[in-house]
Image (cartoon, rainbow, N blue to C red):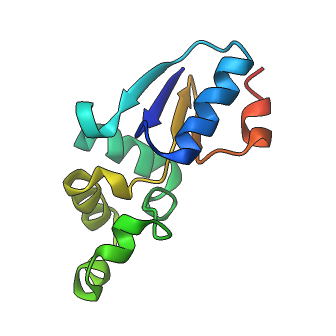
Amino acid sequence: MKLHGIPNCDTVKKARTWLDEHRLAYTFHDFKKQGVSTALLQGWVDRLGWEVLVNKQGTTWRKLDAARQAQVVDAASAIALMLEQPSLIKRPVLEDGDKLIVGFKPGYYDALT
């Protein structure tokens, strides 16, 4: 399993705690330090759609001016913005084989045990 996110994000912390408590092995990919690639984002977008991945509820989105927000209209523009500002990616993103889970709710992760 690979968990993608930002270590100081509260939701990522909850996901990591849950995985640790359930003794599930995972590697952590820090968007801020390790970056994120176009290919990775494109793969996620192909599977889930860009709307799922762009966190429009977060501080980073709200800090964007309305004109910049309005430019996000399709997968290509969403990927470009997520590459520019990885904090816009909804987190965490958990990859486990064929499973791809965005966000954290214990019920989502129960299927992993």
Image location (x, y in percent) of residue 91: 50, 47
Image location (x, y in percent) of residue 20: 65, 19
Image: 55 above or below 42: below
**Residue 54 as seen in the image, left or right of residue 105:** left
Image quarter where the N terminus lies is top right
Image: 20 above or below 71: above
**Residue 9 as seen in the image, left or right of residue 98:** left
Image location (x, y in percent) of residue 66: 29, 87
Image location (x, y in percent) of residue 7: 43, 36
Tell me what residue is drawn at x 35 percent, y 65 percent.
60
Tell me what residue is drawn at x 33 percent, y 46 percent.
42
Tell me what residue is drawn at x 35 percent, y 32 percent.
30
Residue 53 visible? The answer is yes
Tell which of 80 and 46 is nearer to you: 80
Image: 95 above or below 107: above
Q: Quadrant of residue 67?
A: bottom left
Tell me what residue is drawn at x 23 percent, y 79 percent.
68
Total marks drawn? 0
Image quarter where the C terminus lies is top right
Image: 57 above or below 2: below
